[in-house]
Amino acid sequence: ESSGGWGPSTHVPSTSAAMGPPSNGASAAAKSCRSCAKASKAHRAKKLAVPAPGVRRAESASSLASSPKRTASSSSLEFGQGGKRRREPAGPVSEDSRLMCAAVHQFGLVGQPDYDSKWERLRQLLERLPPCSGAAVVFAEADSVHEVQAIVESYRMWSAQELGSRTRHVLREQQKLKVPTPCSNCECKAAPSACRRPPVESMRVDVVMSSSDDVPPGDLGYQYVINYDAPSSGRQYLDRVGLIAGGERADTATPGVIYTFFEGRELTSRRCREIAGLAQRARKAAVARPDLGGLAKAAEFDSALQQLDTSEEDEADDSTGQEGDAEHSESCDCTHCSGRSIGCTTYHVAATGSLVSGPPQVEVVRVPLRALETLEALAPLIAPRLPDHLCTLVCLHNLNCHTPWDGSEHLFALPPGAGSVRVVMVLAKDCSWHDYLDVGSFSGGVSWVDMLDVASMDRTDQLISKLVDHEVGLLGQQSERLFLMGMSQGGAQSMLRFLRSRRRLGGWLGAVCHAPTSPHMPWAADPLLAEGRPLVNLGQPMRLLSGEVDSVFPAPLVLRDTERLRTVGGFTNVSVKVQEGLRHEGLQKDVEAEERGETVKRAPPQELLYLQEQWPSMVAHLASPDSPLSQ
């Protein structure tokens, strides 16, 4: 059956009324967040414990509280004694594991009372599928296929209307930036104007009944498979993986994605165990065979498997009274919050040890995010005082911890002889920069999409923008002397300010984070596709540190995001370092030793060591003849 220019589809006739189209990405995200705010708050109180001052925490609760059984098995696969990499024999790999490794797998927890409903999650996913990037198919059981059909039809009406104006703007921006279009390098017989005509069709989304034998063939080019209802067996799951891993897709540069909904009651079912078994075997194959993705692909499987792990919930049920009061659990007990500070400044020398001398070269300002609303009154208290002030670095911490860099402030220092640096550390309310639509993601990592709440990110971005304007004023309006930095959740929030900035900034540096763009944001709210977006920072340095064994934001996800910054955003100075042995929480050897109960002297924060590597090239333009400093 053909449907309004969407291409061939296999549909089940729907008798339900079509839903109204979502208004826009931001309002839909805000509505979703409000609808599950109560459940989200209770779930966060259960999953996320507030860290003690000075302790670095991961954003994924399960990665911190993973069971000893899982940790031991993971370690034996990747490392031998002494932390050295163990060479696994490259034995034969089953075709099932090869097929699994050729796709990206993500499992989403749905269902009340803790998570979004299925229909809400499907709408969130459809809003995030970039148009003209292949096709998607949604599998549903007979009793829910009409509901799915209504959601898809609503998406079609909304996206067709949205694409009418937006795609023409995007194409104009790509031509302005000389970003290759799908036809720019092909031998097209059509005239150039016709070849580059903006696409007028939305992404094709097919709906298929799970029990139907009429499964679309793989040559239809599916990029996304969404299991609205979980497959009945591991074999059926593999058949659906074959639609993307074995089919002829339009976008072969990026792997196909299969996203499966699971309700809480299904986590102990046979179908769930079979699917988890497929992922576990594929993970072992990836570790043993670098050609299947290696440790980075294994971490990607870990992020998916953590969603299906019920050990934490079982432990929580068995140990009553450990959750505590929800309101108390969400409060932060770091020295800055317990002292009700509205701003403070400390000074540090650029050396370690107790017997150091010389003038301080690092000025660290800590200010709560809420204080930025009345920044004018706070300005005299946090005014810069160090001489030879070369540049300013605005830093945003990770989720759930205000103090990831306490005790390591000296590592912010510039190269010798370059001058002093002012570091402004903003402290988010309740240790979080924004809300989350998918609170189930706290059960593990995300291998494809991290559903960001646009409305709450916008509110934070407005305050960070106000701080940037203030600091640029202190630099004599020389905006290239200001840099942005962030870690994990703070990395995405700080990058959003960099992407939106109409000032030419010095650059951006982030660690263990992803880009706040599609698919993490609805494509209608993607800063890379915004009409009239600023282009002043396209050539400025963007540096990102990713962990090879990070299962919260796996390296393949980070690499896909940064490639999109280049191809869609037009950024020309983007580089990523994938560090061996780095997890989301720190070096793997340190994290695993702590999980075994050992007392460990942690290595310095890896993001600050990475900053030390990048400082010389990032501040080089400040000393060039064209720099305002030399005039």
Image (cartoon, rainbow, N blue to C red):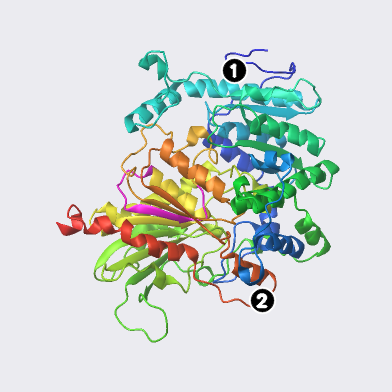
Magenta includes 82? no
Mark yes or no: residue 445 visible: no
In front: label 1 or label 2:
2
Q: Mark 1: which secondary structure?
A: loop
Mark 1, Cα crowd under 10 Å, few <14 / some 14-19 / many 20+, is some
Instruction: From the viewer's side, name the closer residue of 331 and 237.
Output: 237
Q: In this view, does 51 lie above or below 568?
A: below
- Classify residue 567 as left or right of residue 534: right
Q: Mark 1 points at which residue?
A: 6
Mark yes or no: residue 202 visible: yes
Image coords of residue 593 (percent x, y): 65, 71
User: Spatial distance from mark 1 to mark 2, Cα to Cα?
Assistant: 58 Å
* Magenta range: 500-514
Q: Which residue is drawn at 71% across and 35% down?
A: 118
Q: In which quarter of the image is the C terminus?
A: bottom left
First reached walking from the N terminus: tag 1 or tag 2: 1
Image coords of residue 599 (percent x, y): 63, 78
Q: Which residue is drawn at 35% across and 52% down?
A: 507
